[in-house]
Amino acid sequence: MPEAIRYRFRSLQGIFIFIFLIIFGLFITWQKDARNHKNWYGQNYNDSSFLIATINEPPVEKAKSYKALAAVESCITNGFQKTARGNIIIYFAKDSFSNHLKYGDKIIIGKALQSIKNSGNPGSFNYSQYLAFQNIFHQCYLQKKDWILLKGNNANAFKNTLFNTREYIVKTIDKYITGKNESALANALVVGYKVDLDKDLVQAFSNAGVVHLIAISGLHLALIYGLLFWITLQIPILKNSKTVRILVIILCLWFFALLTGASPSVMRAAVMFSFISVGSIFKKRASVYNSLCVSAFALLCFDPFLLWNVGFQLSYLAVLGIVVLQKPVYHWIYTKNKILDLIWKMASVSIAAQMFTVPLCFYYFHQLPLLFLVVNLIAIPLATLALWGCIVLLILSPLGVLPVYFGKLVSGVLWLMNHSVLFISTLPFALWNNVSISVFETILLCIIFISFIYWAINKNKLAFKIGLTFALIFSVIISVNKWNFYRQKKIVVYNIPFHSAIDFIDGNKYHLVSDKDLSEDKLLQNFNLKPARILFMANDKSNIKNLVSL
């Protein structure tokens, strides 16, 4: 084809690629939805059906039950057994039988499944949609008469190794790390095991802006990567062969990523480090932007529903913020002191990451930690010491009395980390909360941030004008919303199992009428009542005296 014709129609190439990617995305999204498969259990299931399922992960103990994820293998309807697939959540009543259930056990379920539904409370977390993105649509509560344990075990050897390794690590940490909160935090740092974490402690980490430390993230994988890189350089066999050393590092990284539950942020880091490491073998230095895009594309090809995962969104935005803004922010301040320079370099990373995640923090969490910089400068070094300390502790665990004393040292680091975060989170100016913005307002906020960041870096006047224009539009919308909320009068009746609660809202004030147990349970109120109050901007408690609790 002549060059002139190719040049004239070069734009069509981009259009065709764009259309292809959209069609490809739609196809893999449709393909990933379990409901579109002919052997999904829901195609042949009714309330009189029996399901044969395998426990897909170790059951987790709850207050009144054991919770487990189960993979359906077959469906028995009207006496005919058909192969089926799909995942369901099962709650087993606590008894001597369910206490011994383990990963890989096969059971027959003889009770009707229930569709997963939301609480229905205004502003509440969309639990059904969250599980639907994981292809989970049903759940059931089983007593002993509702299920039968079958002979045999369907445990996958590799997954069984992961679960056994995780169990060993958790037991070892619980043995040598003193203090309930300290051992729970250590388990969260090392393998992402958060079952024993205190809810108040988790809230404190969230309020302080360091919740990523107790949810395995790219930071943890970066620390593990650095540690593996150093260790492999100390081993002569690996040191002399770069290819073998890189392959060992990649295998260890992926084992750790899968061991911790393969969260989107960890998978993002694992894919990126894998690309960078493989590129170093061939002496290729890839662009960070290309690595980000390729890793996101690879993960979304594997599971397109990750696009709606909060962790996925925040992880990529934080890394993008670091790539774009870290150097410009770092150049704000120059110091010859090496210690101060290192501290400022860490601070510039935190500032850059936070700048790109502010709109999503407001939208998803309705709050913004104002002291995130101070907390990160304290908590990240302590978390690094604690993580490496726990790894050393696991290595020393077979050596008798030595891990006992080393465990006390690590416990001290974890204690200091916990109490530093708890103290800072209680300061009256540590948190900007009760912020409610819509999807449209979040998009406006993103445009504002992008415009002003682009203007600050490139001194582009047009970007500054766009930022100001959208900031004005955003301010007008927020002002109108506040005016409407100040005129509102609402009665909100909450759906809370085993409790009664009604909010009387007048303007920005609310008065709660509830049973005594709920009125004294702040955690239950924060989970069930606070989202509605944030949605309706009712932030002030009313002093009405003539209403009494139910």
Image (spheres, grey):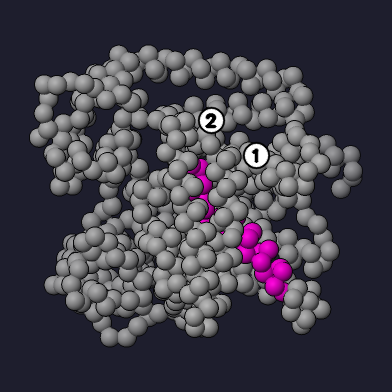
Image point (18%, 72%), residue name: 95
Q: Position of residue 423 (x, y in %)?
A: 45, 43
Residue where numbered disc 2 is placed = 443
Residue range in magenta is 205-232
Image point (73%, 64%), residue name: 277
Q: Position of residue 32 (x, y in %)?
A: 47, 58
Q: Is residue 519 visible?
A: yes
Q: Nearer the viewer, mark 2 or mark 1?
A: 1
Q: Amino acid at mark 2?
A: Ile
Does the magenta portion include 262?
Answer: no
Q: Position of residue 171 (x, y in %)?
A: 41, 74
Q: Viewer-proximal residue, 451 or 110?
A: 451
Q: Of marks 2 and 1, which one's residue comes earlier in the chain?
A: 1
What is the quadrant of residue 455 in the picture? top right
Residue 352 marker? 1
Q: Is residue 522 above or below residue 102?
A: above
Distance from the alpha carbon under mark 2 to that under mark 1:
19 Å
Image point (55%, 61%), residue name: 386
Question: Which residue is most to the bottom?
Answer: 152
